Amino acid sequence: MSDWDHNIRHAFLGDMVVWKEEGKRKYFGVVYKLDYDTWGTITCHIRWTPEKPKEYNEMYGLRQSNIHNQRSKFDVIKVKGERSGHKFKQTG
């Protein structure tokens, strides 16, 4: 597990992202896909339930750095379990 994975503000596969409006938790979703660009920037694609935020674009997702930096707008709830890099490690 890298030091990057230990940062609780970075969303990875399986993590829950909570989108807040006016300080209240309004939208809940789970990261189902990560895209990496040429410069190593990570984009998170999220399945929202029961509805998605109006500002969320399914084609483009959200930059991981935006989720990390906008503390007043996003909470990240980490999935439990071991990970190797950005992929889940199967055990047993």
Image (cartoon, helix red, strand yellow):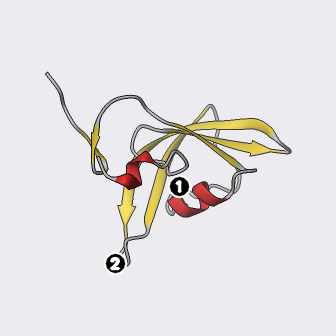
Q: Does 80 sit above or below residue 4? A: above
Helix, strand or loop at mark 1: loop
Q: Does 37 sit above or below residue 47? A: below
Between disc 1 and disc 2, the foreground one is 2
Residue 58: image tag: 1
Q: Residue 15's x, y, as percent?
A: 47, 38
Left/right of residue 69 with respect to residue 13 in the rendered view: right
Q: Residue 49's x, y, as percent?
A: 59, 33
Residue 38: image tag: 2
Helix, strand or loop at mark 2: loop
Q: Amino acid at mark 1?
A: Glu
Nearest the viewer among 64 and 9 is 9
Residue found 75% across the figure and 50% down from its top: 72
How many dots with numbers?
A: 2
Residue 24 seen anywhere in this rendered image of the structure: yes
Nearest the viewer among 7 and 23 is 7
Q: Amino acid at mark 2?
A: Thr
Taking the view exactly as shown, the residue that stands out farthest to the front is: 3
